């Protein structure tokens, strides 16, 4: 039985339950069982959660904090994802394929995360179709997330992508260094500041 | 309508079987059982099998022919996939979320596909032995392929992308207009033409067999 010994973890655990039930159906009992298979981690700012060239063995749920996923193009960091509390993060392709990760996952803020490892997950899938179905739906969620991002990158202008990102993640402007936000949006830092000012001026006028 | 197994060629069965074997062991009887959920669809060339704004109801595997997947933004086309024999293609977001497709699927050659309708897929997931497991593994396999392509597009130079792709797919130069290949590789048509000497050097023997080149 999974026993919560640290009081501050309770809302995060409720968060996992809600996350799963947003996408699929998990009963209280199934959830309790699932939680006995997870581990809890506390990462400091700048801790590497997954290193490049290592095979990703875990999928994380971020209970509190913020992480980023990136790779190196020559010496330049290319940021592909920010994940904050309430979402999953993994070097997913490596996790699924069992090939070395091309990405690095790093904490931007002190972060509390719950993880499940590959072998545990396989042993849960082996318990039957019900678990396989939950797995399929979460996997589909990863695929859709990836596909929607790809479509946005093609269909939207830089300005539109900037707007969409800011609307969906207004808090990240304060939480993520501007250089990193610019890298994620694939724009120069100067362009980023200019757009930020334009947007805030506009919202002030319309307010 | 289900498929008459007598009408499915050995090579088609082979494509389907080797695709499925990537995920888990399949006997030929398993494959035939799964095919019962599918249908065979045939299209002429230059047919839009999924139009923009339409809900995509099919997950397809190309058995013969060629299909391109692209998105049109302000009149400009961006090619996302060129699917040939043995490749799986569909409008992912539309099929999975039952929303209007942002992408267009169009045949470039007369094409035969084995397709599973969204409803039949639900049935297969629930009643085919290990259906859920297969579904999960197909999804994660797709994720990995897409991630590899994204990483490749973002991390490799235009020159390297050109060489990588045409090394692995030399036959595509004959099958697909150059501007489509250029778009798929995210390089301009001009750059594509400029790089063509790279392929002539390495495959000059084959080029001789195509006098029109």
Image: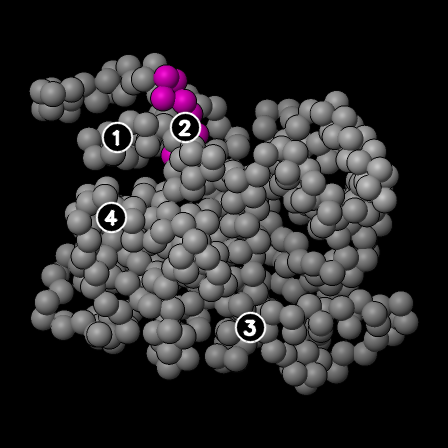
Q: Position of residue A88 (x, y in %)?
A: 66, 58
Q: Position of residue A68 (x, y in %)?
A: 71, 44
Residue at image x 48%, y 53%? Answer: B143
Distance, label 2 to label 1, CA atoms, is 17 Å
Distance, label 2 to label 3, CA atoms, is 37 Å
Q: Does the CB distance between marks 4 and 1 fall below 8 Å? A: no
Residue at image x 62%, y 33%? Answer: A158
Q: Secondary structure at mark 4?
A: loop
Q: Nearer the viewer, mark 2 or mark 1?
A: 1
Distance, label 4 to label 1, CA atoms, is 16 Å
Q: Check if residue B173 falls in the magenta segment.
A: no
Q: Residue furthest right?
A: A7
Distance, label 3 to label 1, CA atoms, is 42 Å
User: Does residue B58 show up?
Assistant: yes
Q: Check if residue B189 falls in the magenta segment.
A: yes
Lateral position of residue B161 relative to residue A49, left or right: left
Residue A158 - label: none
**Circle 4 residues within 10 Å: few <14, some 14–19, many ≥20:** some
Q: Residue furthest front?
A: A206
Q: Which residue is mark 4?
A: B47
Lateral position of residue A199 relative to residue A159, left or right: right
- Residues shaded magenta: B184-191
Residue A134 - label: 3
Q: Does the CB distance between marks 2 and 3 fall below 8 Å? A: no
Q: Nearer the viewer, mark 3 or mark 4?
A: 4
């Amino acid at each position: 039985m999974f026993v919560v010994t640290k009081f501050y973890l309770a809302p995060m655990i409720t968060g996992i339950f809600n996350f799963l039930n947003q996408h699929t159906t998990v009963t209280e009992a199934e959830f309790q069982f699932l939680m006995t298979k997870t581990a809890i981690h506390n990462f400091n700012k700048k801790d590497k959660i997954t290193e490049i060239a290592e095979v990703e063995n875990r999928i994380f749920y971020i209970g509190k904090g913020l992480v980023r996923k990136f790779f190196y193009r020559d010496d330049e960091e290319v940021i592909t994802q920010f994940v904050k509390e309430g979402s999953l993060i993994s070097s997913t392709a490596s996790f699924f394929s069992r090939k070395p990760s091309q990405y690095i996952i790093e904490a931007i803020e002190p972060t509390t995360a719950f993880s499940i490892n590959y072998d545990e997950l396989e042993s849960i899938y082996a318990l039957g179709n019900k678990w396989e179905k939950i797995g399929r739906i979460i996997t589909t969620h990863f695929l859709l997330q990836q596909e929607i991002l790809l479509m946005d990158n093609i269909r939207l202008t830089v300005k539109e992508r900037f707007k969409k990102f800011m609307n969906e993640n207004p808090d990240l402007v304060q939480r993520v260094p501007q250089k990193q936000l610019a890298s994620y949006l694939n724009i120069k830092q100067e362009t980023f500041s200019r757009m930020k000012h334009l947007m805030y001026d506009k919202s002030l006028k319309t307010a | 309508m289900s498929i008459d197994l007598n009408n499915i060629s050995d090579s088609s069965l082979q494509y389907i079987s080797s695709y499925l074997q990537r995920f888990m062991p399949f006997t030929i009887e398993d494959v035939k059982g799964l095919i019962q959920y599918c249908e065979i669809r045939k299209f002429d060339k230059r047919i839009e099998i999924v139009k923009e704004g339409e809900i995509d109801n099919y997950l397809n595997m190309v058995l013969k022919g060629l299909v391109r997947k692209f998105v049109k933004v302000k009149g400009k086309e961006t090619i996302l996939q060129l699917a040939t024999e043995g490749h799986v293609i569909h409008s992912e977001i539309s099929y999975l979320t039952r929303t209007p497709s942002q992408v267009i699927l169009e045949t470039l050659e007369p094409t035969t596909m084995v397709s599973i309708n969204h409803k039949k897929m639900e049935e297969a997931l629930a009643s085919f032995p290990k259906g859920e497991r297969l579904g999960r593994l197909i999804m994660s396999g797709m994720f990995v392929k897409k991630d590899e392509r994204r990483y490749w597009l973002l991390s490799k130079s235009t020159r390297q992308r050109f060489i990588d792709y045409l090394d692995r797919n030399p036959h595509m130069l004959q099958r697909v207009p150059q501007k489509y290949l250029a778009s798929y590789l995210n390089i301009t048509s001009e750059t594509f033409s400029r790089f063509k000497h790279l392929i002539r050097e390495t495959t000059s023997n084959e080029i001789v067999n195509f006098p029109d080149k």
